[in-house]
Image: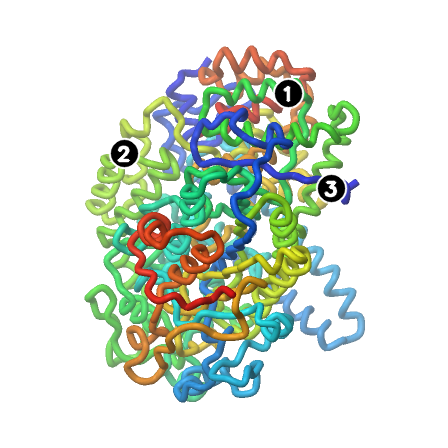
Amino acid sequence: MTERLISRRKFISRTAALGCSLAASPLVTPITLAAAPWDNRLVVIILRGGMDGLDVVRPVGDPAFAALRPTLGAPGAGIETGGFFALSQHLEGLMPMWQGGELGFAHAVSTPYRDKRSHFDGQDLLEAGTGMDVGVGAVRTGWLNRMLETVPGVTAETAFAVGREDLIILNGAAQISSWSPDSRMDLSAQGQRILQHLYHDDPLFQEAGNLASDLVEMLDLEVDGDGMDTDDQTERMMAQMTTAGRATRAKSLARFAAERLNEETRVAAFSIGGWDTHRTQQNGIERPLGELTDALTTLKAVLGRNWDKTCVLAMTEFGRTARENGTLGTDHGTAGAMVMAGGAISGGKVYGDWPGLGGGDLYQDRDLMPTADVRAYAAFAMQGLFGLDRSLLEAQIFPGLDMGVDPRILL
Amino acid sequence: MISERDAISAIRFGYGLAADGSAPKAEAVRQGLAGPDLAAVEWPIAGFDVRSEEARALGELRRARRLKEAGAEEVFKSANLEAQLLVLGDFRRSVLRAMTTKDMFRERLVRFWADHFAVSARGKGLATVTTAYVEDAIRPHIAARFSDLLKAAVLHPVMLIYLDQILSIGPNSKIGQSSGKGLNENLAREVLELHTLGVGGAYGQRDVRELAELLTGLFYNFRTGFKFRHQAAEPGAERVLGREYGGPKRARLSDIEAALEALARHPDTAHHIARKLAVHFVSDDPADDLIEDMAAVFLATDGDLMAVYEVLVNHPAAQVPTLQKAKQPFDFMVSSLRAMGADPAGIDQMNRPDTRRQLLLPLQVMGQSWEAPPGPDGWPEAQVDWITAQGLAARIQWALLAVGLFGQELDPATFARTALGPLATPRLVRSVGFAESRLEGVALVLASPEFNRR
């Protein structure tokens, strides 16, 4: 029972425009889906909590590194790459991808966010894709959504927000779809009609209720019996809820995203949390790096040949302090690293201008100095994948961004 | 029938109407706070002295098991199960207090402040002591001065553990010098960013750092209890927001308290707290004068919370008849149980699997796992964060389940009128009468926009 319930395709369409009626959703008539505007795929993973770029990609060639990281950067602990950088030992599972040129990094990158080092503001700015000039939290739409707005032929299936968390990066006027492993509702057809009636004049509820109904209509085809037996409903709700707890892991999010990307979807976003490693970082970072490994390997496996047309960008709100702190961890910092993967990228290397870690090199004598805006990498990736104009990228998608010189991260 | 004003007050500042359609008078919302805490007497919850001792004992058993002492596995397992049962009992009594009390504003304030000073029961060995933290550090101080509440919450062992303060060592302290260990800024940053000034407040990285140095010395573990470790305290004075604390003498707990008191008194704190109260109780986008008026009284009374609440509940902006907030899942569940007249004894005696299946898991699916907010910033406030397709689907599912368990006898149209009083629209009353079954009709009332707002 449980397996069958969870294996159903359960997705819902979402739009930020309040009051958008059910009739506007292409999912009502699923046969009429338009062809996707491009063949390339972009996956953005938000790494929430502040990933320590200096631990994931260790500048062991920098003479100042060992002193800043006496325990975290212990020589020989990481994976040597034969160059300036070593990779965290917890990335072992991604080494085939690295060797195959399908995994790379950009170092010393940051968003324009500075100084307050708040997770919540930092993530808002990362997802909004704006500069500090407009103010944190002033823009509540995301850069991926603004990108979709500029492209003709986008449908609700083109982009998917995957997982439970609200993804500001996909908020905005362009229609997108969202999916989480545990949306389900059991109500009789009559009950649904009454509910739609009750929600009709309340924009907030009409929106959520219509989409919930959308979901119910799809499920309806497979509902057994009259659905009115309380014990039966209880059973099903419980079965669904117990699986829900396990189903939110990165692997299942990545699997769903890849399945959609093999169909009409071209852009997908989801989050991996757990990077806020204030203490005993070598233990703390193992789990999120494991989830990142699971997510990337699952994407590759499920995407199959489409992996060659895929670029994955994993970005975080800020890096962490250059020095390890007194509790074998690191505190909130500024610049860090971006992870990129996919068959479409030119990997096996670390991009970026290295600012150094010596005296006077650090930002506020504390953090890795940013030498590039992480948005520029995303902008060049989208330019290469989707053929977008530079002027559009610099003015509309990332307002105020100077993309600078193309680092050529795509093949 | 009760007046619209009383109904709105009961929903906005409480957990809604009782099963007989009654609600306290709007003028009396704040009254209960001045009197004794009757709900705590009726549904007792153990304090930290009791729960921390149990946690210590459980820790010993865990160690014994790790050392593979004879019989240790069995003893640990049964003690661990016992501890879980106690936690579930504390949860049920938290629900029962909110569900049965006449003094609803008190219970709402406890949840508000527990969220302002958020900790999570997940991880760091806090699973069995988090309710006790709320019981000891939050509940007794919700009508006191903000500075008292701030000190009680920030200096509580559970907070010290949750935000890593117990690991932070002054780099130039005796322990710091000999062990090479150092600072951890986590608590200091959140005190400034979340607990007092707010992220837009007048502080900088330097203040975070200095406050982190000042906080060194605070220490707790379950075996030795709380103590101020002078050997871990950073020597010398620290300067936070332009004021100096400590000095050449031995570091003292009173310096930390003095810094917290100064932060509690700061105008940015007054605004931050006023805004949070207004956003939580009135509107996602509250009127400026409501915030300004509360902040002014906060400053004029040195943070007397009773005086601030008086402005809040009597303010014209808090009297508007339109309900502008979405009930959070815990509010939704408690107000549903209250409206249906669920049997308190039945909930009190609920066994472990039923507590999990009927209450805890549904809360989780609605998006609000009990005692496990996503981070130290607590739960989101915006309506759109809670009224999502998925969140609403989970509310509807639980409503169908809960009516079967707690409200089988109810008639949909009658229930709409008792649960919402004058706020039940004729359309709602008529519509739910068309449901195919009573159960579904009552569940539709619980799922209605009217019932899900506050």
- In percent of width and height, residue A51 lies at 47, 66
Q: Identify the subunit bearing mark 2.
A: B
Whether discs 3 and 1 lie on one chain: the answer is yes
Three-letter code, disc 1: Gly
Q: Earlier in the sequence, mark 3 or mark 1?
A: 1
At x 55% / y 64%, what residue is drawn?
A341
Residue position for label 1: A191
Q: Is residue B338 above or below residue A98?
A: above
| Callout 2 amino acid | Ala
Q: Nearer the viewer, mark 2 or mark 1?
A: 1
Q: Chain of mark 1?
A: A
Cβ–Cβ under 8 Å for marks 3 and 1: no
**Subunit of mark 3?**
A
What residue lies at 26% left-to-right and 61% top-to-bottom?
B203
> How far across and how far down the image is residue B342, in percent?
62, 28
Circle number at residue A239: 3
Q: Which mark is residue B397?
A: none
Tag 2, which secondary structure? loop
Q: Which residue is mark 2?
A: B287
Q: Is residue A4 above or below residue B443?
A: below
- Vertical order, A320 against B431 (above or below): below
What is the C-alpha distance between the residues marked 3 and 1? 22 Å
State the colouring used for the structure image: rainbow
